[in-house]
Amino acid sequence: MHLVRDLLDKAVVDRNGREMGRVDRVVLDLRDGAPPRVVSIEVGASALGRRLGRRCGRWAAALLHAFGVDEGQPLRIHVSQILGVTDTVKVDLAFGETSAANVERTLRRIVAAVPGANR
Amino acid sequence: MSVIVDLVLGIVTSIGGFVEVGSISTSAQAGSEYGFQLLWAIAVAGAMLALLTEMSGRLSVMSRRSLAAAVRERFGIHFQVVPLASELVLDLLLLTAELGGAGIAVKLLTGIGFQWAIIPIAMVVWAVLWFSGFAVVEHGIGLLGLVTLSFVVSAWRLGPDAGDLARSLIPSLPTHDHVRYAFLAISIVGATVSPYLLNFYASGTLEEEMKQEELWVNTATTFGGNMFGTVVAMGGLVTSAMVLQPLHIQVDSYEQAALMFVPAFGRWAVALFALSLGIGCIGAALEISLNTGYVLSQVFGWSWSANRPRAENARFSCAFTCVLIAATAIAVLGFDPLRLTMISVALTVVVMPVMVLPFLVLMNDTKFVKARTNTPVGNAILAVLTLAGALFALVVIPLEILGG
């Protein structure tokens, strides 16, 4: 598998097929005398921002913090939780129970109060 | 029957491409200043848009991904920052211009200052997006958009010479003001081939769940729909050429453009023009707002669909709402919609290579489109037209600004 071609930037879905985001970063374990190993994937605005540059990462984190949806750290998904990689990366989690859902959850409280939003 | 329904999607998309604030103004200006001479530019723009929308439909049907999602996966976020930022800026500018255009339509109908109409119009656009699914947006604009056929009826009533029309389909050099001529040719292309149309159409085929064995429907809708749009835009140019040019009226406001309907429709002229402009602009505003939601959701991997409850895709719903609020705020400040339009259509041509060239790479990648890759001829036509257009625009736009 090519990490950049086949894993990075792919859509991540939870065990129910719900969109969780994209593979914003891949965390590698660099080992002496052995090839690097994929430890986990990261999903979330702060991970994506950090990939674009340290300053972008700080801005993304500050923005999330300002809106009270501080993820602290981006959602880190261990390789053992990856169920399969096809067109999407399916992981053994439920979106609503992860920090990747923080922004969606906060906005949903606002949106749901608008008439017609739940139809 | 379902084919007819699908054809509507193509027609709707083409209305966004041809019959909105940008196309009406560029056609009217081209006709009033150069007669039929720029008809070829509409034909070229129509062919380009048909090829590009067919490709975006094929990409999404074959790969189950929209254009924005496929670019992120194939090229990564570092590359996508550029086309994404360009598309968001253009979406915002164009949406502002469309709201302004719809405001002008209300002004023509009622005499109320156009800025007063903008907030109510934006609220109508938002309400349609909020309360209805994709099918309502699609079929609604498609049916109402038929009023824009009045441009064709008008041109037909004026009885242009068929030989003159046919000759204008071959590019020729103007007798006066070459820079202006080139600028208008570029503006016609930029007004027609709006980037938002490609991802909007791709997302539409996903919303409609078009299947791989229905790919021929995609081809028929995109070419059929674009032909409809091309003919309407040509009707606008021909009408303007036959009515405004002999009177030496140069279009520098929409009120003047409305005059071109007078010989064909008499006292209904202004109302019909205003309706065509208004419906075209509101249709385009719906498409642009939705597209902003689509693009952001697809790039960042949020759930999206105009067919699911708004609260279920809160980020998508907030995205289209926010862009609409931002555009309304800018429009209310009172920028001249015509100038805003001319800026955004010229910019479109400059940034087009950043959007079209990666798109061509995707269309030749079997991982995305499987066996349905582009033909070398299609690749070559689009690559050459896009690059030539952008280089040409980089020369002509500064000259036009310096000269004008």
Image (cartoon, coloured by chain):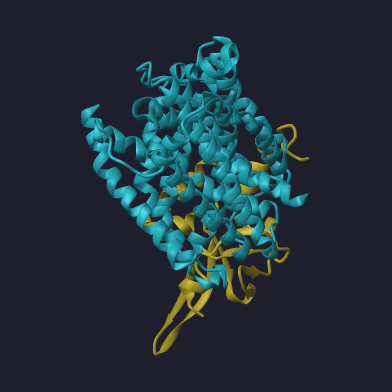
> How many numbered marks does the figure carry?
0
Which chain, by letter, is yellow? A
- Most foreground residue, B317 or B220: B220
Residue B16 visible: yes
Q: Nearer the viewer, residue B113 or A61?
A: B113
Is residue A72 visible to the viewer in this orientation of the structure?
no
Where A47 sits versus B263, above or below?
below
> Which one is in front, B156 or A8?
B156
Q: Nearer the viewer, residue B35 or A17?
A: B35
Tell me: A99 left or right of B230: right
- Residue A51 position, x and y percent, is 42, 60
Q: Is residue A44 above or below residue B133?
A: below
Which hue belongs to chain B?
cyan
Q: Is residue A1 left or right of residue A81?
A: left
Q: Residue at x 67, y 65 (%)?
A: B212
Q: Position of residue A71 (x, y in %)?
A: 55, 53
Q: Quadrant of the C terminus of chain B?
A: top left
